[in-house]
Amino acid sequence: MARTSPPLNERQRASLRLIGDGDDLSGDDRVGLRISARSLASRGLVTVRRTGGKWQATITEAGRDFLDRDGAQPGDTTRASELGSPPRQQRRVLDADAESNPGPSARMRPAVPGARRQEALSLVEQLVRERRIVVPSPNESEREHWRKTIHYAKRYELVPEGEFIECTKAGRGGLVIALVASVHPNAARKSAAALAPVPVPQRLDRLHLAVARLRDDAGKLAMPKQLRHRALLLLQALAAAAEERGWQVRDRSAGAELHYSGIRRQSEHREGWIWVVVEGYSYRVTIDQEFPQTLDAVKSQSLKIELPHTRSGSRCRWADRKTGTLEDRLPEVIDGLATRAAEDRERAAIEEQEAAERQRAREKAETDAHSKALRHFYAETLYQQVSAFERMRAISAYCDAFEEQIAAADPAAPELESAAEWLEWARSHAAEIDPLRALPTMPAAPVFTAEQLAPHPEESDSSVRQRNQLRSAQSEYLDPALMMMLQLQAEKSSFSRWHPHV
């Protein structure tokens, strides 16, 4: 008895019509129809393939024949019976039975693709904001839900470039979902397949000078002879590939190699290295036995190559594995050197820009400080002239009153001569401190010291209050002695600051 296929549902028919019209279902909005396309492919109506990660569905001749026969008018039960589909009335009865008695397949109906995509987008947005999500004690269904959501985000490339989602277990059955700023190992492996191969020589002849010196150095690459021979071949391959790209290869860096304790590490006797200079940046490429103390025959033959660590977390270590040997990883090592040079070049440009910004800020601060110091100097000079003028007026008023008292005194008084002498000196001093005895001019700017260019501290409330009191007061209503005392208190600190030579 021949096995008949179940009839196509409306979703499968719609998918077949789209494919027949030339839609290969590669768009993101066609994700939900790809399941139907798989079912159509199992019937031989379409062919499905993925080339370069892109979905492609193509209709077959059988599929076109089906569409031609499926184009009969509604109500034509002959077409439905030929295709193995029950008549419309019978389908309604079956649908009603299915609704009244839902089976396991109905209860386990998959989620709508649009909802899954929205959940994946929300997850990625939250990870971009928070970088890390902790799910405490999820049950099995919740774990499956998170797994499908993460898989959808990965599969349809919703994760930002240069980052990947990592899901790990937390304590007591929890989950930690994190957005890691690096390249996923699987993606790195795929990109490495497109790199240009690095040929490895079969013999140690015509070696690079750095590799030849390493070969002749008995204190380096202290390992079995076969491993040492292979390590030198790998370094020679890297040196040749580096020079082919226009880089320089040396046996030591331009600077001295520092050792914190002054004693060489024991592992340095096993290590061998060359220095590769890429666009002015020098990197040490180190090769060593990965498991020198192991008794395992396979592990003891494993070598590793290391590059300096980077701030971005780029890969810095390669070793022999079942999936590939170091000979297969040499293109990744060369690419790692180029990546480090690009990162260092970008970092140097950023540091240079930051240094230029700091220099501009420093120059602006110095200019502002000089302008502020000059204004302060002019203001203090003006305050001194005003103070001298007020003192001169006060002394003159005092001398007038003093002279009146001398005139009213007894001419035979013994202290009259001394009083007259003191009055004469007071009037001469008032004339000396008078700022208007000559026409005042713009004071010459001094050469400020570092202390004077330092940020000026805010004046205390008391000094501000004293200065405002002095400015607002009228000399004719103040006692001259009190006015002089207030003025001296207000200018005590500023005078010594701007006139240190006095």
Image (cartoon, rainbow, N blue to C red):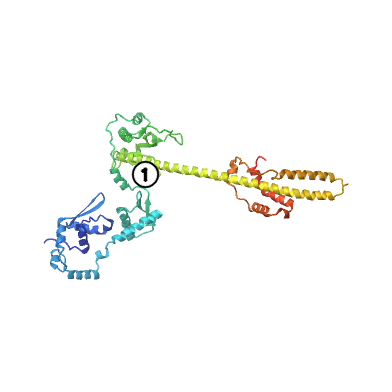
Q: How many residues crowd around disc 1 within 10 Å: few (fewer than 14), some, or many (20 or more)?
A: some
- Residue 170 visible in this rendered orientation of the protein: no
User: Picture coordinates of residue 301 (x, y %)?
Assistant: 31, 38
Percent x, y of residue 319: 32, 41
- Residue 222 placement, left or right of 435: left
Question: Is residue 288 visible in the rendered structure shown here?
Answer: yes
Q: Secondary structure at mark 1?
A: loop
Residue hosting label 1:
314
At x 13%, y 64%, the residue is 82
Q: Nearer the viewer, residue 426 or 56?
A: 426
For this orientation, the residue located farthest to the left is 1
From what the image shows, is residue 302 above or below residue 90?
above
Looking at the rendering, which quadrant does residue 377 occupy?
Answer: top right
Counting the numbered discs, the total is: 1
Q: Please, which residue is most extreme toward the right here?
A: 412
Residue 235 or residue 169, whichever sits in front? 235
Quarter of the figure that contains the C terminus: top right
Tell me the kind of residue under disc 1: Ser
Q: Is residue 90 above or below residue 64?
A: below
Where is residue 127? Give x, y as percent: 38, 55
